[in-house]
Image (tube, rainbow, N blue to C red):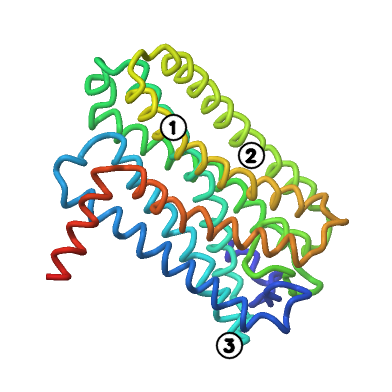
């Protein structure tokens, strides 16, 4: 992309949340609290799973993937947003903006893949319990993780090349609190229809395919669960799957709203759109470890044991 630097601005100006500039200072406090909870919760999940041999199972490996992705997503956006809200540091260099776009959209694709992998794990655990350890071996888990990573990088690379080829000759003010692909692309001179079509295609392919396979997994799971004779087993299965479904809804619902609002949401108040776009990268990473920590007995007991040891 450095080949095109002569036509690109050295910096972009991030406005934060347009329309709520007078409230930026106070908005930053809940953002900071949610960010700290997200980091602490996901780090706790990683440490507990690493230190507890009984948790070295496929389900928890996928949970570790999700925790790492969530920490990267929040750390890519929140510190810069806080510097805008508290210190009026609106400038971001061109290359930093490109890196932020890559990580935000790339790791969103990774998170969707991780949620699909977790749905597959629940399908195998409930529908094929006798073959669980033979199907989801460590090499298979590593290949799934690699496939998720390759898909994310592979889909983002053409987008970044197209974005790097754009010529910016007008305003460099981005009406957002972070560098979002279309928010930046709209500042370019000339046509951006290729960027728009490719971004739209990637979003549709990722969301549609992942959601379709997740739905199929849970339909098959539901068929098996409804046939369980043991009420305790039935409740346990519903509890495990219910928490996963909540996380899926928390991720996809605001993500889709933010994506489509950026393209066709002219009648949506811009402060509402940007606020939801910010929360989409904050709320799921904050709630994921809390939901899984509360629902998973082994993690809950291990965390309580750690706090009790520190208390004594």
What label sits on residue 241 in the rendered view?
1
The answer to whether mark 3 and mark 2 are in CB contact below 8 A is no
How many discs appear?
3
Residue for point 21% across, 64% down: 307
- Does any portion of residue 121 appear in the rendered image? no
Query: Which-is-in-front pick, marks 3 and 2?
Result: 3
**Where residue 168 sits: x, y (%)?**
75, 67
Q: Which mark is residue 298?
A: none
- Spatial distance from mark 1 to mark 3, Cα to Cα? 43 Å
Position of 51 relative to 274 (above/below): above
Q: CA distance from mark 3 to mark 2?
A: 35 Å
Q: Residue furthest right?
A: 267
The x and y percentages for residue 149 are 42, 42
Identify which residue, 153 or 289, lies in the foreground. 289
- Asked if residue 61 is positioned above or below residue 99 in the image, the reply reads above
Quadrant where the C terminus is found in the figure:
bottom left
- Taking 35 as reference, is 5 left or right? right
> Residue 185 falls in which quadrant of the image?
bottom right
| Residue on which disc 2 sits | 202
> Between tags 1 and 3, which lies in front?
1
Q: What residue sits 74% from the left and 74% below the top?
A: 172
Looking at the image, is mark 2 or mark 1 nearer the viewer? 1
Q: Position of residue 256 (x, y in %)?
A: 67, 45
| Local SS, label 1 | helix
Q: Which residue is mark 3?
A: 87
Q: Earlier in the sequence, mark 2 or mark 1?
A: 2
The furthest residue to the front:
231
At a point 59% along the width and 61% down the height, the residue shown is 1
Looking at the picture, does residue 2 appear above or below residue 191?
below
Q: Earlier in the sequence, mark 3 or mark 2?
A: 3
Task: Classify mark 1: residues with Cα within 10 Å, few (<14), some (14-19) or many (20+).
Answer: some
């Amino acid at each position: 992309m450095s080949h095109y630097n002569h036509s690109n601005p050295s910096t972009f100006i991030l406005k934060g949340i347009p329309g709520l500039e007078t409230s930026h200072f106070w908005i930053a406090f809940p953002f900071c609290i949610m960010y700290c909870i997200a980091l602490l919760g996901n780090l706790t999940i990683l440490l507990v799973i690493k230190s507890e041999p009984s948790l070295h199972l496929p389900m928890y490996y996928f949970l570790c993937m999700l925790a790492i992705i969530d920490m990267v997503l929040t750390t890519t956006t929140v510190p810069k947003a806080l510097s805008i809200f508290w210190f009026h540091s609106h400038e971001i260099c061109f290359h930093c903006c490109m890196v932020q776009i890559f990580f935000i959209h790339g790791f969103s694709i990774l998170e969707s893949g991780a949620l699909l992998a977790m749905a597959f794990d629940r399908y195998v655990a409930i529908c094929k319990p006798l073959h669980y350890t033979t199907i989801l071996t460590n090499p298979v888990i590593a290949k799934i993780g690699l496939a998720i990573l390759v898909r994310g990088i592979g889909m983002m690379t053409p987008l970044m090349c197209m974005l790097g080829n754009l010529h910016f000759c007008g305003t460099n003010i981005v009406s957002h609190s972070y560098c979002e692909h279309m928010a930046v692309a709209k500042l370019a001179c000339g046509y951006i229809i290729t960027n728009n079509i490719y971004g739209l295609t990637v979003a549709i392919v990722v969301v549609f395919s992942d959601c379709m396979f997740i739905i199929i997994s849970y339909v098959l799971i539901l068929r098996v669960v409804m046939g369980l004779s043991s009420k305790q087993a039935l409740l346990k299965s519903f509890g495990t799957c219910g928490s996963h479904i909540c996380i899926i809804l928390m991720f996809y619902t605001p993500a889709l709203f933010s994506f489509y609002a950026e393209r066709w949401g002219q009648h949506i108040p811009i402060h509402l759109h940007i606020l939801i776009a910010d929360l989409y990268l904050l709320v799921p990473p904050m709630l994921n470890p809390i939901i899984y920590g509360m629902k998973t007995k082994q993690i809950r007991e291990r965390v309580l044991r750690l706090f009790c040891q520190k208390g004594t």
